[in-house]
Amino acid sequence: MNAKSTPTSSTQADPATDAPARESQNDSNAMWGGRFSQAPDSLMEAINVSIGFDKRLYAQDIVGSIAHCKMLVDQKILDADAGDQIISGLGKIREEIEQGKFEFKNSLEDIHLNIEGRLTEIIGADAGRLHTARSRNDQVATDFKLWVRDTIDAVDDALKALQFALIEQAEKNAATVMPGFTHLQAAQPVTTGHHLLAYVEMLGRDRGRFRDARARLNESPLGSAALAGTSFPINREQTAKALGFDRPTANSLDAVSDRDFALEFLSAAAITALHLSRLGEEIVIWCSAQFSFAKLSDAFTTGSSIMPQKRNPDAAELVRGKSGRIIGSLIGLITVMKGLPLAYSKDMQEDKEPVFDAAESLGVCIAAMTGMIGDIEFNIDRLRVAAGEGFTTATDLADWLVRVLNLPFRNAHHITGELVGIAEKSGRSLDELTLEEMQTVEGQITEDVFSVLGVAESVASRTSYGGTAPDNVMAQVKSARERFL
Ligand code: ARG
């Protein structure tokens, strides 16, 4: 740590005694320093400052201030001239920020005070009228809600694009057979289209969670002021409407201390990230030499600096890895919030970085996954062979015994188990057993049994609603397009 920034440093003045304290009075915070005689310690600034990250809220802060200012004018709380000056000053500040000309100052703590500070430089003391009937507490809640709302909309678009890529691949691979696993043990053959559409469903629920969060978020905190509301005759309906909110929040204490919207965003993000992580994990497995189920394009693969043969699925691994970080953001903020008394506490400034970080990570994960799915190539021949490995049509054989010989399923299961044992001992698959061998276990078995032992027949037979048959996949592709795209 820099010695200069320690509280015991000789550069710090004792507020009660010596002259430098009076000097530092001039440095006391211009926005809230009226009752202070000493400037903040540099460590105070270090722990308090948020401009480094909350500058991202500049656009929301400016539209929020413009809506507030117009309302103050309409309500005759602020005269129209001052209102016009404030609004044009805010417009200029937005330009300065967007052109990279704005000087963000740590001494002004956060985005709200940086903008107000600059407004004062531009229009003079009338800038100070903007904060009438408002507090940074309702201001930051409003800004952050607007930011999360915009982000939810962007995430929804991105998830839709990923669903599109998955649905296209599902259609192409509606009849591509592959092994279906439980316990990562070969279970029954499935179609690759069916497998991919499973993720389309997950992402559909994810989008639903973001939509629900957005609907609950969409109440305006603006006008709740510090915590208790205000004595000025404000019109909260007007500012709510101007900012695209459905209505103002009903309770000022709740409005300034609620971060449910951030937690709901992070919860939805965490669940989405976990879905992406599972798909990332599958891609990693599929692309291993041992599985060889699929190949990622060169665009989403990296080489090894020592092993020339390697094609590493780094992007899929990072999607898996970043999910940990997104889940961590949820855990972090939920922990920050859990012990806070009403209403606002500064702890709540810790809400932004996890949300910004999770949003950024989620955005890049969804985009990378969309790229990978767009051009992944499935190894259809290898998948067909693998689909039959591990006696995956054993259930089809048992079902045949039930359907054709009318055996109870438990007996059929037992008989099939014996046949699997014979095949396994002799290193053959079920359809390589002879009819005679089968009949030694169950005398009534006929030649017809072979019609259900192939993997293509197996998947084609699974036509129950939601099942894996290629015809179902085509119907589900159509339905998914209607529901999601
Ligand atoms: N930067 C603060 C935050 O993000 C703004 C609100 C500060 N309010 C206050 N009374 N100090 O939470």
Image (cartoon, rainbow, N blue to C red):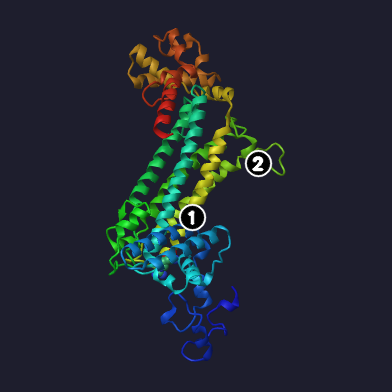
Q: Is residue 269 visible?
A: yes
Q: Residue at x 48, y 65 (%)?
A: 89
Q: Is mark 2 within 8 Å of ligand 1?
A: no
Image coords of residue 296 (percent x, y): 60, 34
Name which residue type carries label 2: Thr
Residue 157 is left or right of residue 289, and the answer is left
Q: Residue at position x 41%, y 54% from top? A: 146
* Residue where numbered disc 1 is placed: 356
Q: Within 10 angstroms of label 2, few (less than 14), some, or many (20 or more) residues?
A: some
Ligand 1, seen in the image, is in the quarter at: bottom left
On screen, residue 286 above or below 367: above
Could you say where residue 328 lies in the image, as x and y percent from the top left? 47, 54
Q: Is residue 2 left or right of residue 39?
A: right
Place of residue 145 in the rendered image (x, y in percent of width and height, measured from the top left):
40, 55
Residue 463 percent location from the top left of the image: 39, 20
Residue identified by numbered label 2: 302
Q: In the rendered view of the protein, which quadrant contains the C terminus?
A: top left
Q: Is 396 in front, or is 370?
A: 370
Count the marks: how many? 2
Q: Is residue 222 left or right of residue 12?
A: left
Q: Quadrant of the N terminus?
A: bottom right
**Residues packed near mark 1 inside 10 Å, few (<14), some (14 to 19) or many (20 plus):** some
**Local SS, label 2:** loop
> Residue 461, located in which quarter of the rendered image?
top left
Tell which residue pokes out farthest to the front in this image.
81
Instruction: Say which amino acid is labelled 1.
Output: Phe
Q: Nearer the viewer, mark 1 or mark 2?
A: 1
